[in-house]
Image: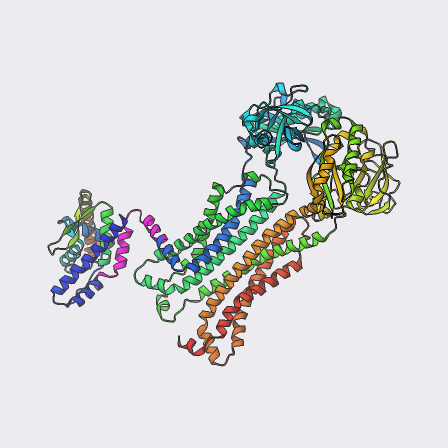
């Protein structure tokens, strides 16, 4: 069965990255994998834009990074959430929840209620 | 640091690809297939890397550095192309920097006094204007009264005087100034060494003291330190040197004259005329506005003082008051020359810029495929535009450095060649202002001419550009045509300017100025102060000087004269020819020249009626005058002027006209036809009343006609004069030929530089035409191939390409003609003797330009006509 894939709304990629990184130090490829798996391939992260986003978040001080050796024996750049990143994630996540609840409520409106 | 970050970026992205490929391979794909799929999923590697770089702080700074390095590398790969651009821009910027440094030093640089904006120049103004205007130098008593009054202005005064320093060292004429003691203070200057003048020095009978310029002290005493306290003999009076003047003081001459050697206290001058409020040599007065006093307030105060004096001394000061204006450097007509040359240099710069844009655009077109490839590979369009601009800015900056080097080399040469000496030349340097200006011009030009090729960075027509044989579209071609038209037009303006000047100089050089300028030497001559004290001794000394000079082998005749035609300095007087003088405002003016008999013949004037001055015309005989044809016509119309009387205002005694001579172009062939005062009258030094002999003798020059090269007789003539009683010194020695050439100095100088600029412009325009036609012809190779396959002969192809070129040239020439006519109008206003619109000069310029530009397009046309249709069609 062909799954229809959704475009990521503007600005949500940063939120998703922060969330994945919050689960523990992780490198870029793993982030891409996790996003794909968790969303059951619905969310297609354009991999070319993943790295610019990571670098942007690092520059804003929400992520920090260091080089570690992976289980396969290669050196990779691992990202971690900073304290500021944790705060921003909490705030953004809450705001996202509010927004989706509101959008859901509006979409759930029945025609007779509109009178 | 930067490099490490790049390495890490590459490693991080590489790790991603490798991991992905490994995962895919583990899923059963072949390694090659896995790598391909991983890459496909990732997208453009470069674009991702670019995106990461964008996230870095101070990205643009690093980027600019990289753009510049990349541009430098690109230019190094094409040294010929880069050299042509650098030289083009260097010449344009160099010419502009050169002229700007002159304009900056002469016109913009403030006077070298402290707070020069608070300084004013003060003059006297009369209600009645004469032909000489209504502004006058200030009389000494009027200056004293104004200085003593409460005006909110501190006043200081000076007057020029020259004389002979006879000890220590050899006797030589030295320029000097008499200054009031407070002048240094008013200007905010202090002596470089020793002291300035005090009130104790500044009265008649005070112990004579002097200040020397550092250069004069060096010349006379070996050093400034040794000069202090030493004795010096100036005009037969012994002075004690009390101070060394600050160099800036010489700027009171207005022109920043370096030749000023000696300063004396004004109040110690015993000349009785200085105390006369009516007829006096006059002072140049400078004032400093006191804190809180505005110029209008000072004007009102000075005017009030003037009116008070007018009431107190009605006989001399009636209708006379003081006026003030901001003190400005007196740069004479240098400003018009500078303005013209700066304009011409800017045209060259513009032309160089257009040429550079043209070359870059043509080059950009050949690089279009490279650009398209890079866009396809993920480089941002903005990035490529920036890189184009980096390249052009780099070129322009290189051009600026080259240009500044050229300006640095050319500046001393330019100042040396400047006709009659560049005023304030000491202020002209390649200073910070010039550097800043040149760099600003360079960066501005770089951005401007880099813009055209930058905006041609491919956008949508990627596919067209990438297709083999595909070429960029029409807009480039149109832009090229516009550039060529602009270049030809700019060159046309400069060529026309040069042509105009060239024809004028040719025409004016051929004009006989009314004197025979060949083989005549003129030199100012100074008698010693002791001799000048006695009129009889003075006359005897002059007779002896002339006799000794006439005895020099090779000298044909010698005479004395006060003002020499074509030389700086003149004596304008009012005259009338009826016994009742007309009102002052309506009296005609004439150039009066006082001569000894034989002067008119020595200079080679033409006697039209009557007789020359004779040795029999002496004191006690009928006072006689000789007038020129211009005065005769104005005063007497068709009537015979011989025997008529003329009043020239010295005293109220008329002189009788005994001869009429041809008009002498006193102001030079360029200016004389339009000069305000052209009438000429000559009177005899032998008949001059005794009381004027001293003053006139201070102004006298000898004129010597020689049978040989006059310069070769300078030493014997100088020795003959020095041997006469009173130790005469000749200075400012000129031949009349030199003066005649000098009178066209501005025109010749402008011609030289316009010629240079025009030649440059012509060369640049030809490069532009050649480059563009070669490229356009290359673009049309396929079309030409078809035409030839269909039977067009090479000659027809040649005509086709040349025809295209002719259209562009004609368009440029037409636009240029409009500009040339406007430029000619401006030049006609600023330069004397151009004689209005010169159609021949314009036609000659257009012809030369067309021929040269067609010549430049010939190689491209020839190559096109040799196109092999088979090869062309296969492309």
Q: Quick one: B286 or A41, which is closer to the camera?
A: B286
Q: Quadrant of residue B308?
A: top right
Q: On the picture, is B761 further left or further right than B469?
A: right
Q: Viewer-proximal residue, B63 or B794?
A: B794
Q: Is residue B44 magenta?
A: yes
> Which span of residues is magenta-colored?
B40-68
Above or below, comparing residue B157 to residue B718 in the picture:
above
Which quadrant of the figure has residue B778? bottom left
Q: Is residue B769 visible?
A: yes
Q: Residue at x 41, y 52 (%)?
A: B394
The x, y position of residue A59, in whole percent, is 24, 47
Left or right relative to B432: residue B685: right
The percent position of residue B277, horizontal first and vertical second, equals 72, 25
Please tell me whether the stretch drawn in magenta is mainly helix, strand or loop: helix
* Residue lying at 44% horizontally and 66% vertically, measured from the top left: B474
Horizontal side, residue B536 vs residue B401: left or right: right
């Amino acid at each position: 069965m062909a799954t229809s894939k959704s475009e990521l709304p503007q600005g949500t990629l940063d939120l998703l990255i922060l969330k994945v990184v919050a689960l523990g130090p992780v490198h870029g490829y793993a982030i891409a994998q996790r996003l794909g798996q968790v969303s059951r391939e619905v969310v297609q992260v354009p991999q070319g834009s993943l790295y610019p986003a990571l670098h942007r978040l690092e520059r804003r001080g929400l992520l920090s990074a260091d080089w570690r050796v992976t289980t396969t024996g290669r050196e990779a750049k691992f990202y971690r959430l900073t304290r500021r990143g944790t705060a921003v994630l909490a705030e953004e996540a809450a705001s996202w929840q509010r927004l989706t609840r509101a959008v859901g409520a509006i979409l759930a409106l029945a025609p007779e209620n509109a009178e | 640091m930067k490099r490490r970050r790049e390495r890490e970026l590459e490693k991080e992205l590489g790790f991603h690809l490798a991991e992905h490929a490994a995962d895919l391979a583990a899923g059963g794909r072949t390694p090659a297939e896995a790598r391909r799929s991983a890459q496909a999923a990732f997208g453009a590697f470069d674009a991702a890397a670019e995106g990461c770089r964008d996230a870095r702080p101070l990205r643009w700074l690093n980027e600019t550095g990289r753009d510049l390095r990349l541009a430098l590398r690109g230019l190094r790969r094409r040294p010929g192309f880069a050299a042509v651009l650098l030289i083009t821009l260097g010449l344009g910027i160099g010419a502009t920097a050169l002229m700007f440094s002159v304009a900056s030093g002469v016109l913009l640089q403030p006077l070298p006094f402290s707070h020069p904006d608070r300084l004013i120049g003060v003059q006297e103004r009369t209600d009645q204007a004469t032909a000489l205007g209504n502004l006058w130098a200030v009389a000494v008593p009027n200056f004293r009264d104004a200085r003593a009054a409460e005006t909110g202005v501190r006043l200081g005064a000076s007057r020029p005087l020259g004389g002979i320093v006879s000890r220590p060292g050899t006797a030589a004429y030295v320029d000097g100034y008499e200054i009031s003691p407070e002048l240094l203070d008013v200007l905010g200057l202090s002596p470089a060494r020793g002291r300035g003048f005090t009130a104790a020095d500044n009265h008649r009978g005070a112990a004579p003291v002097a200040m020397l310029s550092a250069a004069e002290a060096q010349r006379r005493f070996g050093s400034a330190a040794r000069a202090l306290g030493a004795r010096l003999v100036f005009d037969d009076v012994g002075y004690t040197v009390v101070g060394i003047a600050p160099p800036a003081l010489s700027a009171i001459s207005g022109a920043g004259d370096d030749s000023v050697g000696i300063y004396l206290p004004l109040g110690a001058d015993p000349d009785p005329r200085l105390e006369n409020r009516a007829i006096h040599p006059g002072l140049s007065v400078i004032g400093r506005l006191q804190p809180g006093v505005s110029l209008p307030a000072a004007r009102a105060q000075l005017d009030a003082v003037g009116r008070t004096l007018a009431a107190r001394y009605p006989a001399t000061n009636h209708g006379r008051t003081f006026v003030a204006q901001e003190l400005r450097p007196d740069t004479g007509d240098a400003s018009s020359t500078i303005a013209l040359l700066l304009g011409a240099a800017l045209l060259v710069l513009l032309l160089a810029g257009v040429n550079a844009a043209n070359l870059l655009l043509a080059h950009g077109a050949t690089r279009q495929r490279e650009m398209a490839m890079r866009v396809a590979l993920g480089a941002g369009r903005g990035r490529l535009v920036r890189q184009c601009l980096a390249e052009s800015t780099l070129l322009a900056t290189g051009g600026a450095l080259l240009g500044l080097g050229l300006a640095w080399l050319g500046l001393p040469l330019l100042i040396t060649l400047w006709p009659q000496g560049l005023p304030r030349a000491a202020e002209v340097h390649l200073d910070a202002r010039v550097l800043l200006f040149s760099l600003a011009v360079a960066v501005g030009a770089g951005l401007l001419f880099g813009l055209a090729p930058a905006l041609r960075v491919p956008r949508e027509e990627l596919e067209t550009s990438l297709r083999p044989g595909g070429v960029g579209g029409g807009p480039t071609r149109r832009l090229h045509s516009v550039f060529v038209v602009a270049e030809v037009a700019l060159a046309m303006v400069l060529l026309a300017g040069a042509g105009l000047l060239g024809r004028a100089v040719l025409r004016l050089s051929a004009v006989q100025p009314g004197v025979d300028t060949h083989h005549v030497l003129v030199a100012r001559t100074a008698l010693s102060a002791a001799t000048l004290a006695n009129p009889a001794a003075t006359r005897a000394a002059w007779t002896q000087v002339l006799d000794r000079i006439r005895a020099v082998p090779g000298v044909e005749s010698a005479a004395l004269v006060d003002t020499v035609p074509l030389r700086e300095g003149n004596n304008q007087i009012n005259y009338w020819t009826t016994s009742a003088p007309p009102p002052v405002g309506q009296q005609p003016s004439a150039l009066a020249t006082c001569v000894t008999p034989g002067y008119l013949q020595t200079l080679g004037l033409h006697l039209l009626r009557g007789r020359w001055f004779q040795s029999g015309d002496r004191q006690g005989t009928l006072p006689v005058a000789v007038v020129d044809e211009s005065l005769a016509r104005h005063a007497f119309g068709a009537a015979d002027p011989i025997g008529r009387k003329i009043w020239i205002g010295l005293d109220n005694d008329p002189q009788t006209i005994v001869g009429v001579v041809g008009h002498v172009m006193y102001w030079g062939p360029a200016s004389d036809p339009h000069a305000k005062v052209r009438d000429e009258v000559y009177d005899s030094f032998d008949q001059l009343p005794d009381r004027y002999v001293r003053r006139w003798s201070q102004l006298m020059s000898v004129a010597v006609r020689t049978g040989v090269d006059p310069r070769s007789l300078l030493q014997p003539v100088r020795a003959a004069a020095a041997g006469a009683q009173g130790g005469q010194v000749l200075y400012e020695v000129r031949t009349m030929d030199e003066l005649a050439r000098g009178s066209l100095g501005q025109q010749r100088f402008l011609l030289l530089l316009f010629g240079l600029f025009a030649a440059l412009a012509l060369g640049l325009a030809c490069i532009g035409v050649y480059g563009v036609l070669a490229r356009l012809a290359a673009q049309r190779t396929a079309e030409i191939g078809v035409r030839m396959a269909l039977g067009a002969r090479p000659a027809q192809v040649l005509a086709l390409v040349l025809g295209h070129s002719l259209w562009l040239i004609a368009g440029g020439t037409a636009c240029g003609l409009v500009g040339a006519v406007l430029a000619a109008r401006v030049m006609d206003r600023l330069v004397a003797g151009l004689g209005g619109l010169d159609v021949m000069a314009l036609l000659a310029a257009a012809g030369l330009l067309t021929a040269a530009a067609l010549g430049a397009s010939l190689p491209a046309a020839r190559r096109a006509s040799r196109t092999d249709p088979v090869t062309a069609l296969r492309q």
